[in-house]
Image (cartoon, rainbow, N blue to C red):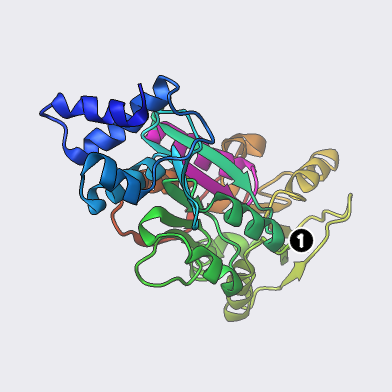
Amino acid sequence: MSLLDKIKSLGDINTLSKHEQLVQGVIESIDSEILVVGDQLPSINQMVADIGFARKTIVKAYEELKHRGLVESKRLKGYYIISQETKVTLKVALLMFSFKRFQEEFYNTFRKELGKRYQIDVFFHHHNPTVFETIVNNIIGKYGMYVIAPIPDESIRPLLTRIDPKKLLIIDRYLPMPNNYSYIAQEFEESTYNNLLELLPLIKKYKEFIIYLPHAKDHPIDTVNGFERFISDHNITGKVKVNYKDGTVKKGRLYFFINDMYLWEVLRDCRNYEYVVGKDVGILSHNDHLVKEIVFGGITTISCDFKDMARKAAKYVKNYELTQEIVPLSLMKRNSL
C-alpha cells in the first residue's frame, strides 16, 4: 500500500476531516514503514492533483506534521520525514546556557509538566555566540516549539526572528524582541536592590560587603548595578571582586556570590577557621537550590523561582497564548546572615 492509498482509505472514516485524514495517513504510513526517515513527501501541487484536496488543507496538514517534529521543509526541495516518533504530540527544542543546578531544576519541572507525549531535545550554548548561532541554524524548521535562553545581545535578535513567533518562547534572560514574541525572563537590578534593602539591618552588622563577579559573560551585570546602587545609597562599605584566594576569608565580612564558583571555597575556609556563618562571616548567594537550604544551617539566597518559570513555560508550550512576563527575584532568608 502506498501513502496515497493509506490517505484515501481513511476517507471512509466520517469523523476525520480532510486535514486530519492527511495527517493520520502520513502517521500510519510511518508506523507501517511505508515512509521512513529521509523519504520525501509528495509536493503540495502533486497532492492537490492526486487526492483533490484544497491546497490550504494540504499546507495545514504538512505544517502540523512539522509541528509534531515528524517532517521538515527544505527550501525549494520539499518536505522530508525526519522522525518516526509518531506517538509524540510535539517536539520541543530547549536551548539553555548550561546544565547547572538551577537549570537542571528548570528542566526537571518542565519535563514533568509536559509529560511523556512531548519530546524535549536539550542543547547548551555556554554563552558562546558562535555555538548559539550554529545550534539555532541547525534546529530551525525541525521542531514544533523552541524554548530558548538567549545570549542577552541584540546582535542575535535577527537570528531568533527567523522563528515563527508562536513557536518561540524566550526564557531566563530578557532580550528585546518584536511585540508578538513571548518571554518569561528574570529582572536583576531592581530585584537585587530591593532584596538587599530588606536585608539592610543584617547587612549593617558587617564591616564590609563584597560581591564576587567572575570573568564570565553569562553573569548578569545588572546584579552588580543593583549592588553598587545599594551600597552607595546606604553608605555601606563594599566592593566588587573577581577572584577569591583560598584562605583569605575574614571575620566581619559579608560575601555575596553571583555564582557558586567561590561559594563552596569560602564555606570550607569558614569551617577550617572555625568561623560561625551568620555571626563571624555573612554569606549571601544567587540562585537557590536544595543544598543551600541545608548546609551551614541554610544559606540566604536571592533567586528566581525556576520551578515556577518552568511551569509557566510548559503552559505556554501547551496553549500557545502570548506571554510576556518579567519575573522578579525573591529573597530566601536563612541563617547565613
Looking at the picture, how far across and down is residue 21, in whole percent? 23, 34
Q: Nearer the viewer, residue 93 or 309?
A: 93
Where is residue 120 shown, x and y percent of the image?
A: 49, 37
The N terminus is located in which quarter? Answer: top left
Residue 14: x %, y % from top left: 10, 28
SS class, disc 1: loop
Taking the magenta stretch, the answer to whether it contains residue 96 is: yes
Displayed quadrant of residue 290: top right
Residue extending farthest left: 14
Image-quadrant location for residue 129: bottom right
Identity of the amino acid at label 1?
Pro
Between 318 and 158, the one nearer to me in the picture: 158
Q: Which residue is mark 1?
A: 214
Q: Quick check: 18 left or right of 335?
A: left
The residue shown at (46%, 60%) is 163
Q: Is residue 297 above or below residue 277?
A: above
What residue is shown at x 16% (from left), y 32% (from top)? Answer: 16
Count of all numbered marks drawn on residues in the image? 1
Q: Which residues are the magenta region?
A: 92-114
Left or right of 70? Residue 249 is right
Nearer to me, 330 or 160:
160
Q: Is residue 248 visible?
A: yes
130 left or right of 40 in image: right
In the rendered image, residue 224 lying in the magenta stretch gets the answer no
Q: Residue at x 68, y 49 (%)?
A: 279
Main secondary structure found in the magenta portion: helix
Instruction: Using a 10 Å C-alpha cutoff, classify the residue at mark 1 as few (fewer than 14 neighbours), some (14 to 19) or many (20 or more).
Output: some
Vertically, is 85 above or below 284?
A: above
Residue 255 visible? The answer is no
